[in-house]
Every structure is written in C-alpha cells, then in structure tokens.
Amino acid sequence: MGAENERIVIGDLILPSPRLQFLRPRAFYFDHKTSNLYVYIDYLVYYGVDGEKILKPKELKRYLSKITDLNDLNDIYINWDIKFVEA
C-alpha cells in the first residue's frame, strides 16, 4: 500500500498519509494545584505536502480536545499547545 493510501485516525479525525506528517510530544506538565495538564506537541509535516492534506494546529487542537475531554472523570483540564513544523 502506498503512502498516499494510508491514514492516521484520531477519534473521528482522519489525517491522510502518516508518512508525510507526525505528532511528536515535546513536553508534558501537570499543575496539581489547578488540575491542569499542559501538553506540548510538534505537528511535523514534510516540506511540500499539499496544504489540503494537512490540518491547521487550531483545527487539530479542537479534535484532540474533543476526544480527550476528561473534565467529567477527574476534573482535569487539558491545555494543548500545538506547534506546526515543516520538516
């Protein structure tokens, strides 16, 4: 199967071609006083990938927030910091 037919699935979000884009964790920080989890991620995309096949960091943050909503479970709020990086 070619890279153009493969996909990354995150909840109901489907990113095409995982060989052309990656999510790389940069750092995690949990503030126990306020129950906030800060997640810093690099969204790596190979230079020259068609702009229609990639998400904007704001769009990706919305999807990640939607599928990781833990407020009802443990009163933990997740703050996503997503940095777009062309590699």
Image (spheres, rainbow, N blue to C red):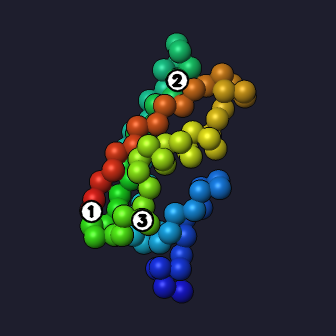
Q: Horizontal and vertical percent for residue 54?
A: 42, 61
Task: State the quadrant of the C terminus.
Answer: bottom left
For label 2, the SS is strand
Q: Are marks 2 and 3 in contact (CB under 8 Å)?
A: no
Q: Which residue is mark 3?
A: 52
Side of 86 relative to 21 (left or right): left
Among numbered discs 1 and 2, the one appearing first in the sequence: 2
Residue at 47% over, 79% down: 4
Q: Horizontal and vertical percent for residue 23?
A: 44, 55
Among numbered discs 2 and 3, the one appearing first in the sequence: 2
Residue at 36% over, 69% down: 50
In this view, 53 is above or below 60: below
Label 2 vs label 3, nearer the camera:
3
In this view, 77 is above or below 61: above
Side of 22 relative to 63 (left or right): left
Among numbered discs 1 and 3, the one appearing first in the sequence: 3
Quadrant of res 35: top right
Q: Is residue 79 visible?
A: yes
Mark 1 closeness class: few <14, some 14–19, many ≥20 residues within 10 Å: few
For label 3, the SS is helix
Q: Horizontal and vertical percent for residue 45?
A: 35, 62
Label 1 vs label 3, nearer the camera:
3
Q: Which residue is mark 2?
A: 36
Report the amino acid beneath label 3.
Glu
Q: Which residue is mark 1?
A: 87
In this view, 32 is above or below 55: above
| Residues at marks 1 and 3, CA–CA distance in whole angstroms | 17 Å
Q: Is residue 41 visible?
A: no
Report the amino acid beneath label 2.
Asn
